[in-house]
Image (cartoon, rainbow, N blue to C red):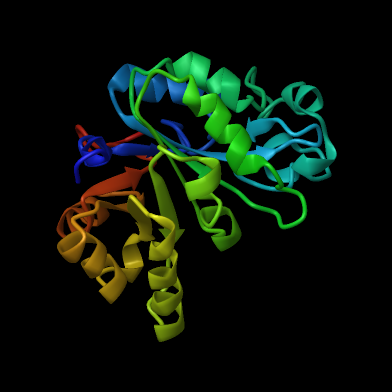
Amino acid sequence: MSGISWLAKRPIAHRGYHDLNRTRWENTLSAFEAAAERGFAIECDVHLSRDGVPVVIHDGELKRLTGVEGSVFQRTAAELGALSIGGTADHIPTLSEMLEKVAGRVPLVIELKGIEGKDEGLVAKVATLLDGYRGEAAIMSFDPWLVREFPKQAPGIPGGLTAMGTSEQDIESHFGMLAYGLSFASYNLDDMPNPFVTFMRERLSLPVISWTVRDKIAADLSAKRADQMTFEGFDPATFAIV
């Protein structure tokens, strides 16, 4: 795990340390600050705005998080930043804002959310922001067309595959991504163990993190199947519900 060993050292707060969107919402500066204060690594999601700015939000559509109709790619970063998340004081942050907030205090795992035809330049723009960032950070994606761009557009930044599935077709597809210099994988806990995860951990000595762990039973299972967990809804230090 040399070079990426930091990935397994501390639990990773899924979309920040939020309270399941009751008062502190996912992928907000408040959730990222709460994770950093507690010493948890942070997972977040990034899309491109209409004007080509990486913004931190999970969904491609705005309705669930902002109550507003439309897609992320239809609005500029400034327009997105003016939208309230869940009626709170938090807004949709740019990745630049998020990096400034965390400021290297804890590791970051940034998932690039692709929409074919709307995400050109996403990898390169995220890489440019991370190039000047003083802190541990990695990128990952479900989308094979983005993972294929990691080696040439984000050289030197650890790149991972976000994955799920146990079918022969799923596993074959995941093995194919190894040609693009994967440094780790983030895998659905319910779909482990499997041949791909076993190969990553035992043959390549590369870390595999699990998603998404929501209670102690799942945390104990993750400890057996993966090198670290991506968690939400509880405090891994006490297993108290957030």
Q: Residue at x 66, y 29 (%)?
A: 85
Instruction: Write the residue at 41% across / 78% down.
Output: 172
Residue 57 appears in the figure: no
x and y percentages locating residue 77 in the rendered image:
75, 27
> Farthest bottom residue?
168
Vertical placement of 189 versus 139: above or below?
below
Q: Nearer the viewer, residue 233 or 142?
A: 142
Q: Is residue 171 visible?
A: yes
Task: Residue lying at the far front in this picture: please name it.
Answer: 152
* Relative to 192, residue 187 above or below: above
Does residue 82 appear left or right of residue 233 in this picture? right
Question: Residue 228, position in %: x, y?
Answer: 24, 47
What is the tally of numbered marks visible in this picture? 0
Q: Residue at x 15, y 59 (%)?
A: 224
7, 233: nearer the viewer? 7
The vertical placement of 176 against 123, above or below, is: below
In the rendered image, the quadrant that contains the C terminus is top left
222 is higher (above) or lower (below) than 92: below
Viewer-closest of 134 and 68:
134
Q: In the figure, residue 51 lies in which quadrant?
A: top right
Estimate the x, y position of residue 131 in percent, counting from the top left: 48, 25
Instruction: Judge left or right: residue 171 versus residue 62.
Output: left
Q: Is residue 172 left or right of residue 216?
A: right
Along the line of sight, the residue nearer the viewer: 165 or 235: 165
Q: Quadrant of residue 199?
A: bottom left
Q: Where in the figure is residue 7, as x and y percent of width and height?
A: 27, 39
